[in-house]
Image (cartoon, coloured by chain):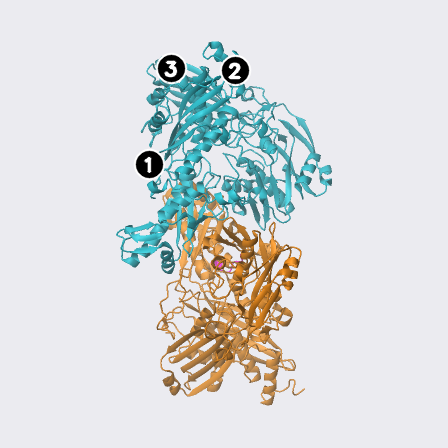
Chain colours: A cyan, B orange
C-alpha cells in the first residue's frame, strides 16, 4: 500500500456510473415473469388479541391469489430473536403485521388488504418505559417488560462522591428517530427447486439468509440472497428486511411464483424499526481542579415491542456512557423495557449518539460549574495511551488528545462567538467521544471478513467481497487496496454483486466494521496474489521475490533491470501455475470478556473524535443554524481521503437532524409522523461551513492500520451543537431534539434570566 | 475418500429434482423486462459476396427495433479464431449469419428477417476437401484451403514395410454427424452499467466470456456469463453459442435492452457446427506372428468454412491414429482443408471416433489376413506399462491388457455368434482404444480447475465449481468428494449455479476433463477444510489432528473417546477461526512438448477401453440390431458407479448412431437434413443388451486416481459394430454410417460371394 501517494487520489467509484446514469437497479425496479405482489395487513392498535381473520371478501377481489397468516409461516415464527414474521395471537405494536395478501398486481393486493376482516380485542397497552416496568403494567413478553440491561461497576462510588468538590445530577433524554433511507425496504422471493432466491437490499445479506432460513424452515444453504443496488441504509434494512423477506418467501413457497413486497413510506414508518429513545440520569463528582472522582449513570431505554438487537445496543451504550474519560469510581446501569411502541433497533450510531449527547452535555455543565475551560476539563480527564477502562481494558492507539489538539487548532474553542446579525445570537460548543470498533465482545463468532479475486487471462480482475456497498464507498476501499498492492489500475477491476451463494459470510456491513475487516482481508488477498505471481516472475528473471515492484500496471525489479507488463505477467503465470488469484480472510484480534464478572475487553479497539460547532439562533423563530462545524475523527490510516470526509459529512448531517429537527412522534402508541412532510431531515441547504477532518494515526491492531468512522461521526455532533446553544443562550436544553419549540422556550428562559436581549419576548 | 464403501451408493443428484419436476429453467424459459428478440438473417448460398444489405422493408415491420450487420460488431469480428459474429464481405457456407433483426417479439423478428434484402453475388464453391486442396479451387481463407495438419514420424517406414510379411492398404471414411442436444443453442444478453450479463447454456462459460469480450470490445471482467440449466451438450454449445452470445450482446449494447436469441432446430442444423468428416488411408505391415512392423496413415479432414477448433481435433486424431499399439515405424499425417461446408468443430469424442473406427476396423482386417484371433493380435501389439508412443512418451497406468482380459471374460470373443432367427444373420466384433486425457500439450495455460466451498453456520455447505453440469453428473462428483472427505451428508450440500463473475476460470467442461480436474480440486478443497477444522477440534480435545475421523456428520477420535456433531464442530470453529471453508486448485501434471521437433508428451495420461458387439442383421431390410454390447472402460478409480455406467451408456448410444444411422447430408453445399425426421438418433428402444463396465485401476497421475471416460465411450463402439457386421456378412463396410443402403449392398455382395444364404436376393 503506497498510502501516502494514493489516499488523496480521486478514484472513479464503481457504483457511481450506474447510479448517476439511472442504470442502477433498485429492488423496486426488478420484476420477474409471473411475479405476484404482497401486501401486509395490520390492525393498527398498539396492543390487541387476534380473535379471527376472515379473508373471504379479500379473496373475492380479482387477481387475489391468497391471504396468509402466521399459521402459514413454514418455519419458526419467532426467530432469530422474538419478532414474528406475522403476529399470531396478539399484536404488540400498531405496525405489527397480521396477514399478507398476495395478488397479481399491487393495486389488487392493496385493495384486498383492506377487505381482510380482522376480529380483535384491544388490550391494555403501555408506551412509557417507566410505566412499563411498574407492577401491574400490561405485559408484552413473559412475566415482565424487562427486556435487557447491562451494568458496569468500578471502584467505590460512595468514596468517589465523598472526594468530590462538586457534584452534579442531571437528566437527559433523546427522542425516537428513523433511518430515512430514500429507498424503502423491500424484497422479492423466487422459488427455486429446493430453496429460495431472494433479492433484497439488506445491509447484512448473510444475516437475512439465516433469518429467512429459520422463519421458513430451510437450511441456510437453501436460501440465496442477492443484493440489488442499495438506496440508503443508515443502520436500517436489517430486522425489517428480514421480516419482509420472510413474508415474500412464505408467499413464494405457497404460490410457487416470484413474490414482491416493497413498503411505501407510511409502512416504513408504521412497521419499521427506529432509534432507541433513552432517558439518562447522570451524577458526576469532580475535584475543583477538574478531575472526575465518580460517576453514576442510570439509563432507561424504550425497546419497543420486540427485543431484536436491543441487548447489543444497550451493551454499547453502557460501555461508552462515561464518555472517553478516566473514571475511577463508576456505576453504569442501563435498562431496556418493552413497550407497545414501534420497535427500537439498529440505527447508525447504535446506542452511542444517545449516551454521548448526555455525557458530553454534562462535561460542559461540569466545566461551567467548575469555572473551567471545557476543553481543558476534557484534557484533564481524557483517556490516554494505556488508560484502563471501567471494565478493565487497557486502551491502545488512543488518539483522543490528538483530536482535541486538532480541534483547538481548527476551531476557535476559547474565543467568544462573534457578533450575530440583528435578532440572532451565536454560541460555540465542543464535544469529544470514544467509540468501540466493530462488533465487540459477546458475539458468538469471529468478527471476520473474506475478500478474494480472480485475475482474468487478460489481466483484468474480478473481486468478491461480502461487505455491502450502501453508499459509503466500501467496495471501492477493497478495490483500492488490491489495486495499490498489485499496482493494477482500478479501472481494470470490477466487484461482483453481493450474492450469498458465492461469497463467504463476511458478516453484516454494520458497526463501522467495513474497512477494518474487508480492508484487511483485501490486503491479505492482494498479498496472496502478489506472492503467487512473484514466484513465477522472480524465477523467470532469476530475481528475488522481495525485489519485485508492482506499480503502474507493470512489474519490475527494484533496480529496474527487468520489467514486464502486468498483463504479460498474468499470461506467463497462467502457463506456470494453476490459477492467478488472491484469497484472504481477516478477523479482528480476539477480545476476552468474562460474562459472569462483567469485565474484560469490550471492543478490540476504540476510535476517537472531537467536534466543534458554532450556532446562530434566530430569537424570533427559535431556528438554529449551525454556521460552522468542525468534525475531527481518528480514522487510523486514511485509505481514501475524499470518501472518508464524505462519510463523516453524512454522519454529521444525520446527527444534526438528531440534534435539532428529527423526531418520530407518537400518541397513545400510534404514529403521528406518517411521512417526510412531518419529519424534518437536514439537507445540504442546512450546512453553512462544514470542515471534516480525518485525523491520521495508524491503528496498531490491524495490518492496514485503519479504524472505522461511519458511526462515530453521528455521535459527536449533538452535544457540540447543544453546548453551543447553551453557550449562546445561557440555558441548557437536555432533551432532544432542540427543535423550534424547545429552543424558543430556552430563549424565553434566557430572556427571563437576562442572559440575552432581544428575541420574541422583547419584540 | 472412503471409496470402496461409497462408490456404489446411489446419491440424489442435485440437478435431478428440478429437471424431473419441470422446475429447471432452460434458456428458452427465461425472460426479462423489456426483452427483445433477435433473429439471424442468412443468405443460404454456400459461398457469396455480399454487395448490399437493404433493411428498409424490414424496419417497417411493426415492433422492429433495428437491423444490424457486421459493421455494427463492436469489437473484433474474427476472434478468438476466424469465425465472425456476422459475415462482412462474404459468406463462406450456407449457414453464415449476415445480419440480425431485433424486434419486440419473436414473430416480428422472424417476419422482418425475411424482408431484409441482401444483394449478393454467388461465388464458386468447393465442398470436397480433396478438390479444395487442388490448384484453382475456390479459396476460403488466405492463399489456400489448407487449414491445419499434424504429422508424427517414428522409425523408418521403408524398413518397417520391408520387414512385413503382410501389408494391407485400406481406406476408410466417416460422415458428418451432429450433437443432437434436445435443447437448441441460445443466449440472452442484458446490458449492465459497464458491461454485459449473458445467460447461456454453454459448456465453457469462461470461454464464452472471453469470446464475447473480444467480439464486443470488452475487457474479460466486464462480461458475466450465467449458465442456466443445460439441455444437453454432447460436445457442442461452444463455438455456436459464442456466436449467438456475441450477436445478442451486440444487440443489447445497441438497444440498451435485454436481447434473446434461441435457434430453432433448422438453425442449429444450418449454422451449427458438426463432427469432422474424415477420409483415412491406412497402410499397415505386420509379421506373420502378428507384430506390426509399420504403419502409414494419411488423413484428410473436412474442416468446413472456419477453423474454430479443428487444429486441436486434428492433433488428437493424429496422436491416436494408430490405435493403442506399439508401432516402431510410423508416419501419420492428417491434413484439414477448408470447404464451403458447414463448420466442423468439437463433438463428443473430438477426433477419436473417426480414427478409432479406421484403425480398429483395420486390426480386424489384419487379423483376418493373418488368420489370427483379433483379440490375440491386439494383445500382441498392445501398449503395456512403460510403452513408448510415437512421439516418445513413456506411458503409465496402462490398463489396456486389463480391458482386453475383461472383454474376454464378459464377451464370447472366440465363439461364433449363435444361430439367428430366420432371415437374419449374426456376427460379433471387438475393438479397443487408447485416448489422451483432458486438454493435452499445445494449450497455453495449465489444465486446471478450482473448487471451493463455504460451510454455513448451521453446518450446511455451499459449493462453488467451474465445471458445468451438462447431464453427466459432474457436479455430483464434486459434492460427493467433499461429502465423503468431510463425512457430511450430500443432502446438506448445494452447488451454486455456474456464474463467471464468482467462480475461478476452471476451463471448459470438455476433453473428458471434468472429474480429473474438478474432482481433484474438490479433494484439495475438502482436505483444506478438514485441516482447518481439525486444528480447532483436536486442540479442544487435546488430540492429534491425524487421529480425527470425519464420518456420518460427526467428528470423532479414532479411539472413539471423543465425538462432536459436524454442526456443533462448525459452531465451535466459527468461534475460533475467521472462516470455515475449503479452497482448492488442482492442475494436471505438466507435459513437455517440442513444437519444432513435434515430439514429447501429448497428454498427461491416457485411458483405455475395449468393446464387444454382437449384431443381428435383417437380410431383407439391411437393418442392423446391436443385440449385445459390452463396453469396458479404464476409469481409474470409480467415484460413482451408477453415474459412470450411465455416462458410458450415453456414449455408446451416441456411437451407435455414428456407426449405423446418423448422417447430416448435404448437396452442393446446402443441407438436406433439416430436422430429426431425417436424422435417425439411437434411442433406448434400440438397445438390446448393454453391459457397461467401468474397470477400476487407480490412475497414478492424480491424488484421486481417476480418469475421464466421457469421450472414450463414443470411440470404441463403431469399429466393434462394423467388425461384427463384417463377421456376420463376410463383407467389410469401410464408410460410415453402415446405414440400411450400405448394409443392404454388403448383404448383396455377401450373397454374391456365397458367404451368406437368404436375404433380399434369394427371396
Placement of the N terminus of chain B among the 4 image quadrants: bottom left
Q: Which residue is mark 1?
A: A700
In the picture, the disc for residue A161 is 3
Q: Could you tell me what secondary structure mostly forms the magenta stretch? A: loop
Residue that appears at 35% across and 47% down: A485
Badge 3 density bin: few <14, some 14–19, many ≥20, Cα 10 Å: many
B363 displayed left or right of B178: left
Q: Which residue is mark 2?
A: A745
Q: Are marks 1 and 2 in contact (CB under 8 Å)?
A: no
**Between discs 3 and 2, the one toward the N terminus:** 3
Q: Nearer the viewer, residue A173 or B575?
A: A173
Q: Nearer the viewer, residue B412 or B600?
A: B600
Residue A742 visible, this orientation: yes
- For this orientation, the residue located farthest to the left is A559
Query: SS at mark 3?
Result: helix
Give me the chain letter of mark 2: A
Q: Is residue B7 magenta?
A: yes
Placement of the C terminus of chain B among the 4 image quadrants: bottom right
State which region is magenta.
B5-11
Q: Is residue A122 magenta?
A: no
Which circle, 3 or 2, is nearer the viewer? 2
Residue B580 at x, y percent in the picture: 43, 46
Residue B168 at x, y percent in the picture: 46, 85
Q: Nearer the viewer, residue B51 or A264?
A: B51
Residue A263 at x, y percent in the picture: 60, 36
Query: SS at mark 1?
Result: loop
Residue B457 visible, this orientation: no
Amino acid at each position: 500500500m503506497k498510502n501516502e501517494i494514493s489516499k488523496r487520489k480521486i478514484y472513479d467509484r464503481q457504483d457511481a456510473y450506474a447510479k448517476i446514469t439511472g442504470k442502477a437497479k433498485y429492488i423496486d425496479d426488478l420484476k420477474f415473469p409471473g411475479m405476484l405482489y404482497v401486501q401486509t395487513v395490520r390492525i393498527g392498535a398498539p396492543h390487541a388479541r387476534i380473535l379471527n381473520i376472515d379473508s373471504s371478501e379479500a379473496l373475492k377481489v380479482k387477481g387475489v391469489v391468497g391471504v396468509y397468516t402466521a399459521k402459514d409461516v413454514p418455519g419458526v415464527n419467532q426467530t432469530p430473536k422474538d419478532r414474528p414474521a406475522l403476529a399470531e395471537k396478539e399484536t404488540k405494536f400498531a405496525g405489527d403485521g397480521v396477514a399478507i395478501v398476495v395478488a397479481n398486481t399491487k393495486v389488487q393486493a392493496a385493495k384486498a388488504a383492506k377487505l381482510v376482516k380482522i376480529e380483535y380485542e384491544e388490550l391494555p397497552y403501555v408506551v412509557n418505559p417507566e410505566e412499563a416496568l411498574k407492577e401491574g403494567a400490561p405485559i408484552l413478553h413473559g412475566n415482565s417488560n424487562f427486556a435487557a440491561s447491562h451494568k458496569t461497576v468500578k471502584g467505590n462510588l460512595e468514596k468517589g462522591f465523598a472526594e468530590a468538590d462538586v457534584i452534579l445530577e442531571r437528566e437527559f433524554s433523546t427522542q425516537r428517530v428513523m433511518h430515512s433511507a430514500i429507498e424503502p425496504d423491500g424484497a422479492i422471493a423466487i422459488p427455486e427447486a429446493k430453496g429460495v432466491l431472494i433479492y433484497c437490499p439488506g445491509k447484512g445479506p448473510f444475516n437475512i439468509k439465516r433469518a429467512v432460513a429459520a422463519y421458513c424452515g430451510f437450511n441456510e444453504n437453501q436460501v440465496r440472497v442477492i443484493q440489488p443496488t442499495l438506496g440508503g441504509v443508515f443502520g436500517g434494512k436489517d430486522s425489517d428486511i428480514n421480516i419482509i423477506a420472510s413474508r415474500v418467501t412464505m408467499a413464494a413457497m405457497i404460490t410457487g411464483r416470484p413474490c414482491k413486497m416493497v413498503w411505501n413510506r407510511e409502512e416504513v414508518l408504521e412497521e419499521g424499526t427506529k432509534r432507541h429513545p433513552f432517558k439518562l440520569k447522570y451524577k458526576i463528582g469532580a475535584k475543583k481542579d477538574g478531575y472526575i472522582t465518580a460517576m453514576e449513570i442510570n439509563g432507561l431505554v424504550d425497546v419497543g415491542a420486540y427485543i431484536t438487537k436491543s441487548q447489543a445496543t444497550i451493551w454499547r451504550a453502557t460501555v461508552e456512557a462515561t464518555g472517553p474519560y478516566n473514571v475511577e469510581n463508576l456505576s453504569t446501569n442501563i435498562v431496556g423495557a418493552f413497550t407497545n411502541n414501534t420497535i427500537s433497533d439498529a440505527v447508525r450510531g447504535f446506542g452511542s449518539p444517545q449516551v454521548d449527547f448526555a455525557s458530553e452535555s454534562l462535561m460542559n455543565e461540569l466545566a461551567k460549574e467548575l469555572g473551567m475551560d471545557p476543553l481543558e476539563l476534557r484534557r484533564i480527564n481524557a483517556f490516554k495511551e494505556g488508560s484502563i477502562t471501567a471494565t478493565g481494558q487497557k486502551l491502545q492507539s488512543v488518539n483522543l488528545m490528538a483530536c482535541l489538539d486538532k480541534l483547538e487548532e481548527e476551531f476557535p474553542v476559547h474565543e467568544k462567538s462573534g457578533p450575530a446579525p440583528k435578532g440572532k445570537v451565536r454560541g460555540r460548543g465542543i464535544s469529544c467521544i470514544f467509540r468501540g470498533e466493530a462488533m465487540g465482545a459477546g458475539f458468538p463468532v469471529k468478527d471476520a471478513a473474506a475478500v478474494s479475486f480472480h485475475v482474468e487471462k487478460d489481466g483484468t480482475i474480478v473481486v468478491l467481497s461480502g461487505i455491502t456497498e450502501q453508499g459509503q464507498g466500501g467496495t471501492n476501499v477493497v478495490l483500492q487496496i488490491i489495486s495499490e498492492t498489485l499496482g493494477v489500475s482500478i479501472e481494470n477491476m470490477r466487484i461482483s454483486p453481493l450474492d450469498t451463494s458465492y461469497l463467504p459470510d463476511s458478516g453484516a456491513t454494520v458497526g463501522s466494521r467495513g474497512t477494518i475487516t474487508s480492508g484487511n482481508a483485501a490486503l491479505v488477498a492482494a498479498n496472496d496474489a502478489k506472492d503467487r505471481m512473484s514466484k513465477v516472475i522472480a524465477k523467470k528473471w532469476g530475481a528475488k521475490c522481495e525485489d519485485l515492484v508492482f506499480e503502474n500496471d507493470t512489474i519490475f525489479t527494484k533496480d529496474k533491470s527487468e520489467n514486464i507488463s502486468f498483463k504479460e505477467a498474468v499470461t506467463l503465470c497462467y502457463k506456470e501455475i494453476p490459477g492467478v488469484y488472491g484469497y484472504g480472510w481477516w478477523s479482528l484480534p480476539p477480545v476476552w470478556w468474562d460474562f459472569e464478572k462483567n469485565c474484560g475487553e469490550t471492543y478490540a479497539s476504540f476510535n476517537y473524535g472531537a467536534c466543534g460547532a458554532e450556532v446562530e439562533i434566530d430569537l424570533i423563530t427559535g431556528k438554529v443554524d449551525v454556521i460552522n462545524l468542525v468534525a475531527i475523527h481518528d480514522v487510523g490510516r486514511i485509505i481514501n481521503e475524499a470518501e472518508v470526509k464524505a462519510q463523516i459529512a453524512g454522519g454529521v448531517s444525520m446527527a444534526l437532524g438528531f440534534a435539532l429537527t428529527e423526531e418520530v412522534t407518537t400518541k397513545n402508541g400510534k404514529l403521528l409522523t406518517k411521512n417526510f412532510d412531518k419529519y424534518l431531515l437536514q439537507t445540504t441547504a442546512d450546512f453553512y461551513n462544514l470542515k471534516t477532518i480525518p485525523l491520521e494515526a495508524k491503528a496498531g491492531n490491524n495490518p492496514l492500520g485503519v479504524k472505522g468512522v461511519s458511526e462515530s461521526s453521528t455521535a459527536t455532533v449533538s452535544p457540540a451543537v447543544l453546548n453551543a446553544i447553551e453557550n449562546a443562550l445561557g440555558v441548557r436544553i437536555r432533551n432532544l431534539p432542540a427543535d423550534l419549540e424547545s429552543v424558543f422556550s430556552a430563549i424565553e428562559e434566557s430572556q427571563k434570566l437576562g442572559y440575552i436581549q432581544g428575541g420574541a419576548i422583547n419584540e
